[in-house]
Amino acid sequence: MPNHLFDQITQRMPVADAPFAHLPDGRNYSYADVLGVSARFANAITILGVKKGDRVAVQVEKSMEALMLYLACVRAGAIFLPLNTAYTPAEIEYFLGDAEPSLFVCDPARAEALRPAAAKAGAKLETLGVWESEAKSAGSLSDKALAASATFTDADCAADDLAAILYTSGTTGRSKGAMLSHENLASNARALVETWRFTSQDVLIHALPIFHTHGLFVATNVILFAGASMHFLPKFEPAQALSLMQQATTMMGVPTFYVRLVDHPGLTKQTTAKMRLFISGSAPLLAETHRAFEAKTGHAILERYGMTETNMNTSNPYDGDRIAGTVGFPLPGVSLRITDPETGTPIAAEEIGMIEVKGPNVFKGYWRNPEKTAAEFRPDGFFITGDLGKLDARGYVHILGRGKDLIITGGYNVYPKEIEGEIDAMPGVNESAVIGLPHKDFGEGVTAVVVPVKGAELNEKAILAALEGRLAKFKQPKRVLVVEELPRNTMGKVQKNVLRDTYRDLYKAS
Ligand code: AMP
């Protein structure tokens, strides 16, 4: 039966024995394995009673079988719901209560701790671990999949049927489930294959987690839609990535991957000579990292911008200037505008406002949350991303940060990125985060949290003095705090909410 997403994957598949993935344990996964194993898992979940439209919540370690479970859900018409492996049982209880999955799949080692949460939500519990060898399964769902047939009749799924629900990282308030349709995922995979020129000859270094849109959809769907292959790694290790660059053509990473590579003595023109493309996203790549990487390798990292709710929105060009500190142009089929955040009226180039997007990539709304969904869309269908940005004269999109990170001090708007840019350019500074903290005179006091480069000495007075004359008085930080590192989430994003919380009483006495 027609299955909107999976049919597009099978139509693009190369010959059956072509490689899909090379695993660190030496196993090779062919496209025939993709078809067979995803069918086995689709049969296993169907036998367990999963029906079209049911949610299948999954909190497991990264493995090829976990990826096959995603495809199995697509094939069975179920809704794949991956959960961050760092979530605690209390957090899992919230997600299961909210999503009401009919099946919850977890790591065998966590089954006992999570059984009460599954029972409370009325979900069946099965386990899936990392396979140690082809002959040895791990977990009850693997056993059921091994015993099931390797052929499956795909469920009938239309373009708008849901393929997945991904919970947002929830840095403010509770996470919300973003509902992603078959066509949301398919359209984005097609746009990215075209924009980044992926072909069946490509070999990707895949070291990202697969519970997030980056590793799950951007990386995996691009490989499937190109009929290409990947080195599928449990996590990112610079030395391993460098050695795989002899056999690979492309890498997708978060900025921390590139920071770590730049620090590695093995990163040279020679070690990266066979690679054709390095892509970065999920958090801002420092212009300095972009420049350092290019100086060492001759490769200009291609930065792109997306989010859980929208898949990918923009990308720097494949041909043409990949400009550090920008995220390039809207992808084919994606409309992007910058508006006055209050009124939604489009504003001129070079002016800072709210980034809004519309297109086949944009999600269907928040799971069981019509009010929140309505609040985040304009009447003409544009989604209000919550990111502040601008378009420059050449049409490149610049991201200035999350709207909620905007600082309002004495009635003036301060965009943290502008101040961070000034501080980051100072000698001895590794990186910085500028936040607003409660202040009785100003409403919010501009505050810089600064990380020195290894071995450098930084002091507050010198940084403040250096900023005088470079920034308008109202933009200058009231305090500079020197710390060893910034708090980050698993995707490498700086958690400004954590910083605001840690230092919330800083100006209490003033
Ligand atoms: P997530 O939903 O976890 O993927 O987070 C999406 C958010 O990450 C976006 O709304 C942006 O704030 C941020 N983001 C993603 N890519 C970039 C980028 N290239 N530069 C700056 N911020 C980014």
Image (tube, rainbow, N blue to C red):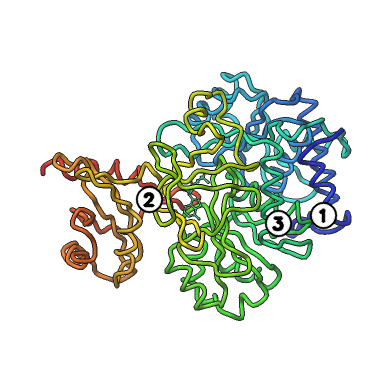
The local crowd at label 3, few if under 14, some if 14 to 19, many if 20 or more residues have their Cα within 10 Å, is some
Toward the bottom, the furthest residue is 270
Labels 2 and 1: the sequence-earlier one: 1
Task: Please state the horizontal and vertical placement of residue 355, each as a whole percent of the image.
Answer: 47, 46
Instruction: State which tag comes first along the sequence, 2 or 3.
Output: 3
- SS of the residue under disc 2: loop
Disc 3 target residue: 193
- Residue at numbered disc 2: 487
Q: Position of residue 464 (x, y in %)?
A: 19, 62
Q: Is residue 200 left or right of residue 170?
A: right
Determine the residue positioned at 32% across, 59% down.
420
User: What amino acid is labelled 2 in the image?
Assistant: Pro
Res. 117 in view:
no
Residue type at numbered disc 1: Ser
User: Alpha-carbon distance for marks 3 and 1?
Assistant: 20 Å
Ligand 1 near label 1 (Cβ, under 8 Å)? no
152 over 313 or under it: above or below: above
Q: Nearer the viewer, residue 248 or 199?
A: 199
